[in-house]
């Protein structure tokens, strides 16, 4: 199964790669191009998606409409997208991790899998960090584990299942126990830390103003590599945990879309991610830089991400 | 600390004709979309944000604040005139507003709503401008355990709205909680009761449920009562008494304590993220009714009821900005949209906002003050127009309202799935109200349910399931004791009311 998936992915990427340079300039959407955001209005995906649409519209002159279609961390939107005819009129924007988690946990109930889409590119990668209040009696992940063992248990605020699993893997690896409090988004995580109800929690850049003001400190990166702004803090691998969480904001459309359309939209996204407007909004939303993995890179990221999520969820 | 020159410069930036024009535009748009059933200020803001890209930050944010504030005033209009609240927070306003309108005093009712809304809003703005930093720190100390206790207290206040049948009230509340539990559970993210519909994964959308239950079911009732006659939506009896068309100073002044209580409740609940204006409006309404010398007159057109509800739900809006500006934590969907607009315009809400961008923040405060005055002025004109509009035959008004509700919910929930849910709840609402079950209790339970469940899960995780930990929090203990007291008190009062005391006489 996995080999088949990889081969298919490879085949699809090569086909797209071949078709791309030829047709990119000739295609334009027949009528408005709709970008469906897999989350509600006002969140980071929505904010970046709207600016992306605006820049693409300015660059290409296409009529671009942005819609919110929240539900299941993007699953409702991608379910709809996978059932549409591939006309190059509708593209979806979501975040990799929540979709991959649902595919691993209940893939048999979903009408799509990783290969049900033509991938168009990515906008940014979130650098997920474990952060603590400034008075926490530890400064790194090793210190945190030691303190949790000493106290018997340690309250940690999480936002989503992968973070819960990451902490459970940490318990399995190190023997330190945690009280996992599920918060409603990063804002609530920060509130719990600032209010002293928990000592540490996960955040994806929302904590940045508090680093600047000195009210919080970074413990470690929850991703595969160290945080760009705190390279010395390491990752969970420092205490022997092999799992990691790396959410990426990506765009995709229905499988079987005209390769010329895929190439043209992907090129428009790529051009937009290089604009100063996108740099600014990505900085405000994720504290990072725009990142476009491209058509093949995005498909590869999803395929590898699925394998990584399978490891994370393996019992 | 921000120095005085920054504050003055900020206000000076705000008070320009250019900004006033955008505030005016925002308030007018907000009042319009608020008054049209089915489309609320939240949706208007979501649509308007991209149009503010081209503006400077201050006029852009002033415009959005105007939409938000105008929408709250507008929301009371359909609730009072047609008994079809477009948003759940106006449902409490309908309870006394609509009876007053039916007595031929629609202008008086809507004006009272406007005045108390602006009063509550101004109160919370002043609190925001002067003491937001210490209040935000207090709000931070309200952890999950305290929030659970506060929610229990809010539920206990609902006992004051239960009315004649305790059993029916409890059934309505339980149904609300049951529907609130649809979607993924807050702790393990397992989908519950979604029956394969991924659109339900995040729960039933509040606009679908609220508009279906409150607005469409009322339209169904009106249709069933029409018997083919053509009649005006509201009979504007001209009593010849000019006092029926306006709110006198004496009437306004008689509501001062009611409005102060409403504004205080709204400000406190607004400063705590996630509880919201609906709960504030109903808590204020129930408390006002309970403390009144004449509780029997509530629900029959008591002007105090309008003042209680509108002052509280409007005060939430200003107070929602307290955690938003000082901590970067949005307290509601409206506040989340404002944060998104801030970020698009290069502002990062949080602890350093006042230091880094104090001038812009005080500019925002200036714009908020302007918006309050503009609200009052635009409202005076707008209300007259709306009262004229609903004098049209029911067949026209309700048909258009139905269409607008469908369009509005389709937009708010991004598709026809939300409309289908709305229609299901319209039928449920029609049946429930026909059999004497309180829709209002259902809606509040539905609205508070998810937050309640999440806070319970968080509290249990924090305490490792050890309930005795509650005693370590004096605030939680105090709130729980208050809840018990208020339930007993309300139930005794209800029992007294049933024991032969005629409702239209003072019960004390």
Image (tube, helix red, strand yellow):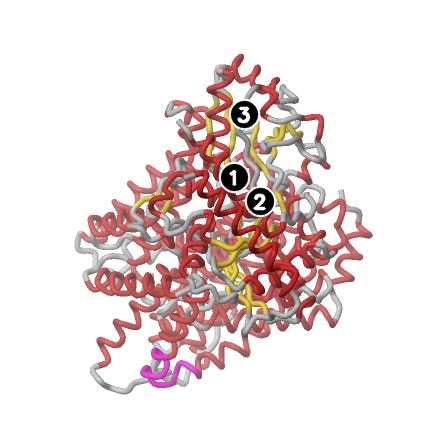
Residue A305: image tag:
1
According to the image, label 2 marks what residue? A248
Q: Position of residue A139 (x, y in %)?
A: 66, 22
Numbered disc in front, either 1 or 2: 1
Q: Residue at x 80, y 57 (%)?
A: B9
Q: Position of residue B106 (x, y in %)?
A: 41, 76
Q: Is residue B148 above or below residue B304?
A: above
* Chain where mark 2 sits: A
Q: What range of the chain is rendered magenta?
A: B389-399
Q: Residue at x 46, y 49 (%)?
A: A115
Q: Viewed as shown, does residue A58 lie left or right of B392?
A: right
The answer to if B395 sits in the magenta stretch is: yes
- Tell which circle, 3 or 1, labels the residue nearer the N-terminal end: 3
User: Marks 1 and 2: CB-CB under 8 Å?
Assistant: yes
Q: Secondary structure at mark 1?
A: helix
Residue A242: image tag:
3
Q: Residue at x 30, y 65 (%)?
A: B423
């Amino acid at each position: 199964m996995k080999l088949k998936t990889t081969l298919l992915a490879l085949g699809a990427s090569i086909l797209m790669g071949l078709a791309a340079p030829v047709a990119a300039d000739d295609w334009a959407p027949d009528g408005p191009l709709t970008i469906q955001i897999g989350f509600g209005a006002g969140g980071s995906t929505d904010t970046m998606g709207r600016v992306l649409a605006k820049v693409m519209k300015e660059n290409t002159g296409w009529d671009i409409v942005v819609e919110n279609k929240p539900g299941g961390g993007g699953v409702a939107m991608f379910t709809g997208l996978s059932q549409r005819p591939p006309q190059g009129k509708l593209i979806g924007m979501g975040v990799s991790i929540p979709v991959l988690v649902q595919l691993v946990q209940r893939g048999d109930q979903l009408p799509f899998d990783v290969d049900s889409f033509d991938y168009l590119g990515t906008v940014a990668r979130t650098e997920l960090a474990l952060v603590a209040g400034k008075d926490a009696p530890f400064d790194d992940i090793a210190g945190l584990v030691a303190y949790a063992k000493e106290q018997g248990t340690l309250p940690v605020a999480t936002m989503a299942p992968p973070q819960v699993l990451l902490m459970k893997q940490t318990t399995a690896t190190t023997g330190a126990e945690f009280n996992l409090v599920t918060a409603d988004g990063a804002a609530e995580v920060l509130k719990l830390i600032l209010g002293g109800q928990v000592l540490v929690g996960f955040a994806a850049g929302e904590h940045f103003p508090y680093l600047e003001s000195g009210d919080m400190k970074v413990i470690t990166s929850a991703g595969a590599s160290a945080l760009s702004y705190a390279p010395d803090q390491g990752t969970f691998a420092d205490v022997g945990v092999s799992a990691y969480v790396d959410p990426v904001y990506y765009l995709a459309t229905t499988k079987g879309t005209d390769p010329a359309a895929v190439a043209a939209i992907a090129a428009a996204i790529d051009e937009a991610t290089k604009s100063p407007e996108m740099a600014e909004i990505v900085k405000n939303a994720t504290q990072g830089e725009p990142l476009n993995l491209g058509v093949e890179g995005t498909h590869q990221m999803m395929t590898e991400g699925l394998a990584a999520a399978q490891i994370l969820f393996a019992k | 600390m921000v120095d005085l020159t920054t504050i003055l410069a900020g206000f000076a930036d705000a008070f320009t004709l250019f900004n006033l024009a955008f505030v005016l535009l925002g308030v007018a748009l907000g009042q319009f979309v608020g008054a049209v059933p089915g489309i609320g200020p939240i949706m208007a803001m979501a649509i308007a944000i991209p149009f503010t890209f081209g503006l400077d930050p201050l006029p852009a944010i002033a415009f959005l604040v105007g939409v938000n504030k105008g929408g709250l005033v507008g929301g009371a209009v359909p609730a009072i005139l047609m008994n079809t609240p477009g948003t759940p927070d106006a449902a409490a306003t309908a309870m006394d507003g609509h009876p007053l309108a039916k007595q031929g005093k629609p202008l008086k009712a809507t004006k009272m709503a406007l005045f108390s809304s602006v009063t509550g809003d101004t109160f919370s703005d002043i609190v925001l401008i002067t003491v937001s930093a210490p209040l935000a720190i207090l709000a931070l100390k309200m952890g999950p355990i305290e929030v659970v206790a506060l929610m229990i207290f809010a539920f206990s206040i609902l006992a004051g709205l239960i009315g004649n049948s305790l059993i029916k009230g409890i059934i309505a509340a339980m149904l609300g909680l049951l529907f609130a539990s649809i979607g993924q559970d807050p702790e393990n993210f397992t989908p519950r009761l979604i029956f394969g519909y991924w659109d339900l994964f995040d729960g039933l959308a509040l606009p679908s449920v609220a508009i279906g239950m409150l607005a469409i079911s009322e339209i169904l009732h009106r249709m069933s009562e029409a018997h083919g006659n053509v009649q005006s939506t509201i009979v504007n009896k001209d009593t010849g008494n000019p006092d029926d068309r306006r709110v006198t100073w004496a009437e306004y002044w008689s509501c001062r304590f009611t409005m102060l209580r409403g504004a205080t409740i709204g400000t406190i609940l607004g400063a705590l993220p996630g509880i919201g204006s609906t709960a504030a409006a109903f808590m204020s309404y129930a408390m006002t009714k309970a403390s009144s010398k004449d509780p029997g007159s509530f629900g029959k057109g008591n002007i105090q009821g309008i003042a209680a509800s509108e002052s509280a739900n409007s005060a939430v809006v200003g107070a929602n900005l307290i955690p938003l500006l000082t901590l970067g934590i949005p307290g509601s969907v409206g506040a989340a949209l404002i944060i998104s607009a801030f970020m698009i315009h290069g502002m990062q809400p949080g602890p350093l906002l006042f230091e880094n961008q104090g001038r812009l923040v005080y500019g925002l405060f200036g714009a908020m003050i302007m918006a309050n005055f503009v609200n009052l002025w635009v409202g005076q004109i707008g209300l007259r127009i709306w009262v004229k509009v609903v004098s049209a035959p029911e067949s026209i008004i309700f048909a258009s309202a139905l269409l607008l509700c469908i369009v509005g919910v389709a937009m708010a929930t991004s598709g026809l799935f939300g409309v289908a849910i709305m229609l299901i709840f319209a039928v449920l609402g029609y049946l429930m109200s026909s059999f004497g079950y309180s829709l209002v209790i259902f809606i509040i339970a539905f609205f508070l349910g998810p937050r309640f469940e999440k806070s319970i899960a968080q509290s249990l995780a924090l305490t490792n399931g050890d309930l005795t930990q509650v005693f370590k929090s004096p605030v939680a203990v105090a709130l729980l004791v208050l809840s018990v007291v208020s339930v007993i008190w309300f139930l005794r009062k209800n029992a007294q009311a049933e024991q032969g005391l005629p409702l239209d006489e003072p019960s004390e």
